[in-house]
Amino acid sequence: MGPRGCSFSGFSQPGDVHAAFDIPRGVEAEGWLRMRERKSINQVLYSSYPSIPEIDAAKDQAQMDAFNVSEQDLLAVALGAPARQIMLRAEEIGPQTGWKDGYLSMEHGFCPPDYDEAAGALARSPGRVWSDLCERMPGCVSRGRVRESIAAAPTIEGTEDVIPDQALWAALVALGMLCSIYRFEQKYDGQDGVNASTNPTKLRLTCRMGDHLGEELLGIPLSIALPYFQVSRRMGRTLPHLTFVDQSSYNLKIKDATSSYPYVARFDNIELRWPMFGERAEVAFLKGVAETSASFQHGPDAIAACQEHVMNRNVEGLLHEMIRLKEILERMSNAFHSISTNPNAGRELRAGSAMGSLG
């Protein structure tokens, strides 16, 4: 038995495990139990969602936050096993579910194992319309034609029969950024770039809008509002929203996937997949943010190793992993230096005056 109070599944327990869990004879128990449940955590916790009227009836942020599962429920699902078991389960279920619970693996930590997988799956589906739109956005922004371009797009639904699970992350990022840039031009009325319209303040779009999908999508064309709503719910997001991680860490292309030391997504080894403005400041800032996160690539594995050494009371092993974890954490602060305010820094230039506007 393990130490008092220890729930480490690796320790033995009295009784017949095969009989208790109905495991076939001759089958390795631990592996069979881990493979039996194939649902993602999002599928378990978000089996149903509140209706649109219920969401719209929320009056304050506390009521909005109540639509998400409680931290206690999340911990009850996620912490049913030590850190290593959670990572093993994530590696097994993640590729089959499109990493709905987020990326987690021993080798890549919270980073995607393959940065091109989701974008490639999206490009092979009808959702390619959204990725193609994202690639055109810098030109559309410069001409003040963002809203017209998005409004002219066909309506592709974000359901499972249209968009596969493997494309969900790319779809979420692309649709979220399209909604965001649409709002930007709507606020500034196309005057941020060259205005191609004779009278932009009188722009009238005849397409259907996603007003019935909730306040977040009010005034957004149905061509992106509907799939964004559907994809967000498939990913466990009750309210559609774009996170900072979406537009930085999950919006990257790797130049050389074999160049992995000390971590893959280094500033000089990544490119922003879908910049909205195409400006050096935007690209450098989001790449810097992504690298700061990517520098912790091997952190989860080190944390799991620390836990294992604690359970085994291996002091020397724990000390070794703690030193390794300290070195990983020290890299995170160094990643900030990839953003330079030196006007002669070329592609790495990040003007200080623009930090606030893009951040």
Image (tube, rainbow, N blue to C red):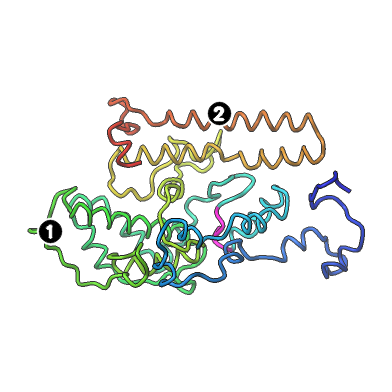
Callout 2 environment at 10 Å: few (<14), some (14 to 19), or many (20+)?
Answer: few
- Specify whether 25 is left or right of 303: right
Which residue is depicted at the point 34% across and 64% down?
A: 217
Q: Which mark is residue 330?
A: 2
Residue 167, percent across and down? Answer: 47, 62
Gap in angstroms between the C-alphas marked 2 and 1: 50 Å
Residue most toward the left?
198
Q: Nearer the viewer, residue 7 or 249?
A: 7
Q: Main secondary structure of the magenta part?
A: loop
Which residue is depicted at the point 57% across and 32% down?
A: 329
| Image quadrant where residue 38 sits | bottom right
Element at label 2: helix
Residue 57, percent across and down? Answer: 40, 68
Magenta segment range?
97-102
Residue 248 to residue 95: above or below: above
Residue 255 to residue 353: above or below: below
The amino acid marked with disc number 2 is Glu
Q: Nearer the viewer, residue 273 or 259?
A: 273
Residue 88 in the magenta stretch? The answer is no
Q: Could you tell me how many numbered marks the image carries?
A: 2
Q: Which mark is residue 201?
A: 1
> Which quadrant holds the C terminus?
top left
Residue 352 to residue 202: above or below: above
- Specify whether 206 is left or right of 316: left
- Specify whether 97 is left or right of 348: right
Residue 331, percent across and down? Answer: 53, 30
Callout 1 environment at 10 Å: few (<14), some (14 to 19), or many (20+)?
Answer: few
